[in-house]
């Protein structure tokens, strides 16, 4: 682990500098979000000879000492060439970055390894988050590894069972809030202000987003320095798309790639405040009071990182698009049946968005498109069970010839 790295903490809005020991998550001057800024004048690229992983890029991550690192082997996920699905959709160069291959089954592990490592450096004992499922599952696992106390606030009755099992099995304390995710997050923010011993681990925490930016580093390295034409991600709280855009920008500044992709944010039709803001060219986000979608991971009406998301999409000349729940489920089935990749509904949303963008001429058949599938399908088994029940099966008695059944299937 390289010590003495050159980075600082700045306000995303007014650029005011803050001490690295500052433990708030909003600018003291203007109230804006904070971000970690690295000095990118380094002359060497020592990571190029290391295996693909989050910590491959340790020189670009804000953890000082090797003994502080809390890792479960995250990152290094596959960038899969999807020839069959691409042919169906009308794309020649479609890639899926399958973040379901991470230790707890979602992209959240990239950020959590860095954020929990930061908590260890700050000598925190208790960490806390609000979650629709994946954040809580990831935080619970990394907290267990680090020996930290963990509290997870979830909207009551609105978290997929597969995710709740992960939170509980790792020993986190679960608090169910009678409300939606946005209200659970508001509760967490108030608690961390009232109890200084609690360390907030939602994507307001800029150190968590530093881990998530490695998604962009990996995509660039897996494509041998070629920048995709489009990178498409589902958008809930907005940390992932903004972190990825930061990562692509840093690699361009380092000379690791010449260009950057257009960033595309996909939201569910009834949970789409970012899409509305982009289409209306708004400078501020208007929260959505009662977001609804089958894709629970992006059922968020007031994304805390909205300012970073709007800038990422606009700076990259990108797009925000909404899709229906029906389109999401169709994309989930297609990804599984054409490419053998099983993702949760939110992870299928980018594939659903491709169809719309091809129809309206935004994406060309020859474009290099990377979709980020954010979580494994077993994260939300209720949806998988619904699909399984609607699929045909063939029943035969033991010992009875199966030849006729085989003929029907083939």
Image (cartoon, rainbow, N blue to C red):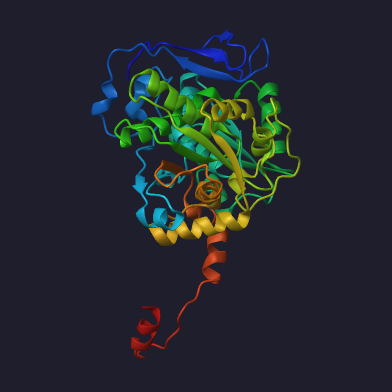
Q: Name, please, the residue furthest toward the left.
A: 49
Figure quadrant of residue 280: top right
Q: Nearer the viewer, residue 380 or 358?
A: 358
Q: Quadrant of the C terminus?
A: bottom left
The relative height of residue 238 versus residue 58 in the rendered view (above or below) is: below
Q: Nearer the viewer, residue 181 or 309?
A: 309
- Kindly tell me whether residue 66 is visible in this rendering: no
Figure quadrant of residue 385: bottom right
Q: Nearer the viewer, residue 6 or 331?
A: 331
The relative height of residue 187 versus residue 347 in the rendered view (above or below) is: above
Where is residue 387 shown, x and y percent of the image?
54, 65
Where is residue 242 shown, x and y percent of the image?
53, 29
Identify the residue at image location x=51%, y=56%: 331
Q: Name, please, the residue furthest toward the bottom.
A: 400
Q: Quadrant of the N terminus?
A: top left
Counting labels gives 0
Figure quadrant of residue 76: top left
Identify the residue at image location x=37%, y=52%: 82
177 horizontally vs 147: left or right: right
The relative height of residue 300 versus residue 217 in the rendered view (above or below) is: below
294 horizontally vs 40: left or right: right
The relative height of residue 270 versus residue 74 in the rendered view (above or below) is: below
Where is residue 320 shown, x and y percent of the image?
59, 38
- Kindly tell me whether residue 375 is visible in this rendering: yes
Where is residue 226 shown, x and y percent of the image?
34, 32
């Amino acid at each position: 682990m390289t010590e003495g790295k050159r980075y600082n903490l700045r306000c995303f809005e007014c650029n005011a500098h803050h001490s690295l020991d500052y433990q708030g998550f909003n600018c003291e001057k203007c109230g804006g979000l904070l971000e970690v800024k690295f000095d990118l004048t380094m002359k060497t690229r020592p990571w190029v000879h290391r295996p693909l992983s989050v910590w491959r890029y340790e020189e670009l991550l804000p953890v000082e000492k090797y003994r502080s690192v809390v890792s479960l082997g995250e990152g290094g996920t596959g960038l899969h060439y999807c020839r069959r699905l691409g042919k169906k959709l009308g794309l020649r160069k479609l890639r899926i970055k399958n973040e379901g291959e991470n230790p707890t089954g979602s992209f959240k592990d990239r950020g959590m390894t860095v954020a929990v490592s930061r908590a260890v450096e700050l000598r925190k004992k208790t960490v806390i988050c609000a979650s629709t499922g994946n954040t809580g599952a990831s935080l619970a696992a990394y907290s267990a590894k680090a020996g930290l106390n963990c509290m997870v606030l979830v909207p009551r009755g609105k978290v997929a069972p597969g995710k709740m099992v992960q939170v509980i099995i790792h020993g986190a304390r679960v608090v169910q809030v009678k409300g939606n995710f946005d209200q659970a997050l508001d509760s967490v923010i108030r608690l961390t202000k009232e109890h200084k011993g609690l360390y907030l681990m939602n994507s307001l925490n800029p150190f968590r987003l530093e881990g998530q930016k490695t998604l962009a580093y990996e995509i660039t390295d897996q494509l041998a320095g070629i920048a995709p034409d489009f990178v498409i991600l589902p958008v809930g709280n907005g940390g992932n798309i903004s972190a990825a855009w930061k990562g692509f920008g840093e690699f361009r500044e380092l000379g690791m790639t010449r260009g950057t992709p257009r960033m595309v944010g996909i939201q569910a039709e009834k949970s789409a405040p970012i899409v509305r803001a982009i289409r209306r060219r708004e400078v501020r986000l208007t929260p959505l009071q009662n977001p609804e979608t089958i894709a629970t991971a992006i059922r968020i009406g007031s994304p805390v990182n909205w300012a970073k998301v709007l800038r990422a999409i606009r700076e990259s000349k990108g797009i925000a698009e909404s899709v229906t729940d029906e389109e999401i489920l169709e994309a989930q089935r297609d990804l599984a049946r054409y490419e053998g990749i099983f993702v949760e509904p939110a992870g299928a949303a980018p594939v659903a968005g491709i169809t719309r963008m091809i129809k309206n001429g935004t994406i060309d058949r020859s474009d290099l498109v990377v979709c980020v599938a954010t979580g494994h399908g077993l994260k939300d088994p209720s949806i998988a069970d619904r699909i399984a029940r609607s699929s045909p099966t063939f029943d035969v008695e033991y010992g009875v010839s199966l030849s006729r059944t085989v003929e029907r299937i083939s």
